């Protein structure tokens, strides 16, 4: 009994520490004050003004840019990473090791090294920085994670299934669609979600590859805001909404997974 | 032409080629560019000026050493706080543990700049001063989940029969922990260290916000140099950092590749 009590109070304490700042954001999203931490009475004004088009045009467009860049990067890295994983699985062991080692480099590199190296690449080639360069950069650090989530599924697969399909007269394309892809789907989906998450959360790499033509994502927008001294108040309700949505989604997925097991 | 392409893609191993080209263009060449810029002066001639400047100028050097110190303390605190949490989670029934692990990872979904600014508000609210203490809190706060997750993953996969065997052989609970459980979880700790130590050195923004611009870490130095157009010097400093990464990952390459294969690095 005491053991259980100790367990839960320790984990509870850590979680309280992790969540304290988030609760502050959520609580103060229900007041109008410009400065985070000032309470000027309950109000939903920040929520309504967040959804009023035009008022915070730059914030809304930053949000859209973040989502679009996230979707394109996640889609492209899932495609590239899945193809790569299928290819790697069919290489000889030495080649496999080489490609896999190269695959971990972007994961081990801190953001800022990836950012500076890509910045130097883009200025050396002389491409103007903007949407394209950000997407290319995001694909660079997202794809390795897709490869890592698809590869284990290939390893676990029965290799005879694919051969059997070919023996029974399926074309390679049909066998790919009917045998391989269904088997890889869970890995591809988790790779996609991971890539999307990494992309929308990225700040450093984006900052170095976004150029200076006024393109903003949520991260660079907040950074510029913070350097000016304050946070746009509407970011509080926006963060709260994102947080609650993700919380509910994850809990639902988890519940379903638990039920399936039972 | 079409049949040629089809037969080319018919061979599965060729499917690696697009990604290998991508890696070459966007990972390998850019990293070589860092080396190239680092060993060149502003006129593009081969020189060691940048490194001489790094060794002679106390400012960048001091920031570098200070950052390593902050990173060491943060990593230590993350292990100290995170290991017990991971251990306790691994002992729970798996459905409940999964839920709690999700709760530990969830804060990462809020943009870290917003979370950091909220931490500033929290410190103001509690009337605590901003500075070194706030910096360490912010760092631990940001990186703790990266320590808990890999350790939890390893502990959860640990073969229970090994622990039982140790008990059967007469070990007391303390011996069971120090002789069996802890050594078996080293790969998790080492991937946790990789996930915490280097990123702390290279973060920027967090330190400025939590110390009202009083303290800066090496990441900020890098960013400032690149932003002020000192590409060569910035590249040299990046190379110094790359060497440090190479050094730390050399120490545990084996456990790294293994951890990455098992998805622990995520």
Image (cartoon, helix red, strand yellow):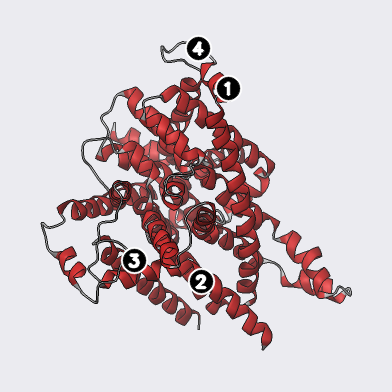
Q: Nearer the viewer, mark 4 or mark 1?
A: 1
Q: Nearer the viewer, mark 4 or mark 3?
A: 3
Q: Is residue B56 visible?
A: yes
Give the letter of the chain under mark 4: B
- Distance Cα–Cα, label 2 vs label 3: 21 Å
- Distance Cα–Cα, label 4 vs label 1: 19 Å
- Distance Cα–Cα, label 4 vs label 3: 53 Å
Question: How far across and down, in percent of the image, does residue B73 sit?
Answer: 62, 51
Q: Secondary structure at mark 3?
A: loop
B43 sits to left or right of B65: left
- Distance Cα–Cα, label 3 vs label 1: 44 Å
Residue farthest to the left, as pictured: A54
**Tags 4 and 1 both on a single chain:** yes
Badge 3 crowding class, 10 Å Cα cut-off, few under 14, some 14 to 19, many 20 or more, is: some
Give the residue at mark 3. Answer: A37
Badge 4 crowding class, 10 Å Cα cut-off, few under 14, some 14 to 19, many 20 or more, is: few
Give the letter of the chain under mark 1: B
Q: Residue at x 34, y 29 (%)?
A: A122
Q: Nearer the viewer, residue B32 or B242?
A: B242
Badge 1 crowding class, 10 Å Cα cut-off, few under 14, some 14 to 19, many 20 or more, is: few
Give the residue at mark 2. Answer: A15
Give the letter of the chain under mark 3: A
Q: Quadrant of residue B4?
A: top left
Question: How far across and down, in percent of the image, does residue B183 sit?
Answer: 75, 59
Q: Secondary structure at mark 4?
A: loop
Give the residue at mark 4. Answer: B46
Residue B56 is tagged as 1
Q: Residue at x 63, y 48 (%)?
A: B72
Q: Report the quarter where the N terminus of chain B lies.
A: top left
Q: Nearer the viewer, residue A228 or A209?
A: A228
Badge 2 crowding class, 10 Å Cα cut-off, few under 14, some 14 to 19, many 20 or more, is: some
**Upstream in the sequence, badge 4 or badge 1?**
4
């Amino acid at each position: 009994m005491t053991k259980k009590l100790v367990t839960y109070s320790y984990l509870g304490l850590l979680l309280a520490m992790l969540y304290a700042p988030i609760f502050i954001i959520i609580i103060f999203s229900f007041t109008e004050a410009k400065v985070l931490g000032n309470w000027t009475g309950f109000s939903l004004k920040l929520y309504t003004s967040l959804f009023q088009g035009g008022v915070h045009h730059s914030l809304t467009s930053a949000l859209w840019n973040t989502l679009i860049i996230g979707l394109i990067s996640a889609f492209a890295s899932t495609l590239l990473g899945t193809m790569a994983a299928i290819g790697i699985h069919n290489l000889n062991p030495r080649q496999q090791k080489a490609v896999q080692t190269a695959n971990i480099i972007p994961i081990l590199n801190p953001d800022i090294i990836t950012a500076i190296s890509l910045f130097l690449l883009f200025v050396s080639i002389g491409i103007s920085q903007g949407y394209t360069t950000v997407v290319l950069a995001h694909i660079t650090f997202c794809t390795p994670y897709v490869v890592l989530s698809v590869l284990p599924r290939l390893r676990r697969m029965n290799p005879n299934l694919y051969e059997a399909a070919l023996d029974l007269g399926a074309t390679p394309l049909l066998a790919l669609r009917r045998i391989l892809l269904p088997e890889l789907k869970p890995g591809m989906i988790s790779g996609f979600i991971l890539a999307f998450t990494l992309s929308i959360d990225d700040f450093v790499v984006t900052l170095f590859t976004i150029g200076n033509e006024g393109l903003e994502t949520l991260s660079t927008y907040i950074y510029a805001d913070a350097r000016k001294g304050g946070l746009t108040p509407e970011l509080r309700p926006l963060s709260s909404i994102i947080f609650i949505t993700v919380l509910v989604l994850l809990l639902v997925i988890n519940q379903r997974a638990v039920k399936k097991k039972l | 032409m079409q049949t040629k392409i089809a037969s080319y893609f018919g061979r599965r191993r060729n499917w690696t080629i697009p990604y290998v080209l991508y890696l070459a263009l966007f990972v390998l060449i850019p990293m070589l560019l860092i080396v190239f810029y680092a060993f060149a002066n502003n006129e593009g001639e081969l020189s060691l000026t940048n490194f001489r400047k790094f060794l002679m100028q106390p400012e960048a050097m001091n920031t570098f050493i200070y950052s390593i110190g902050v990173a060491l303390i943060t990593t230590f605190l993350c292990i100290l706080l995170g290991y017990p949490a991971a251990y306790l989670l691994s002992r729970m029934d798996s459905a409940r543990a999964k839920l709690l692990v999700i709760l530990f990872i969830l804060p990462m979904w809020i943009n870290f700049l917003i979370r950091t600014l909220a931490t500033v508000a929290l410190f103001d609210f509690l009337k605590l001063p901003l500075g070194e203490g706030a910096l360490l809190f912010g760092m631990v706060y940001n990186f703790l989940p990266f320590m808990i997750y890999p350790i939890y993953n390893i502990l959860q996969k640990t073969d229970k029969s090994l622990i039982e065997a140790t008990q059967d052989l007469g070990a007391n609970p303390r011996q069971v922990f120090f002789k069996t459980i802890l050594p078996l979880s080293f790969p998790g700790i080492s991937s946790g260290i990789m996930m915490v130590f280097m990123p702390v050195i290279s973060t920027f923004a967090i330190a400025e916000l939590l110390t009202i611009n009083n303290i800066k870490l090496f990441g900020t130095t890098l960013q400032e140099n690149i932003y002020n157009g000192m590409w060569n010097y910035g590249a040299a400093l990046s190379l110094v950092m790359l060497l440090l990464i190479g050094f730390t990952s050399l120490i545990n390459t084996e456990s790294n590749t293994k951890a990455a294969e098992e998805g622990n690095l995520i």
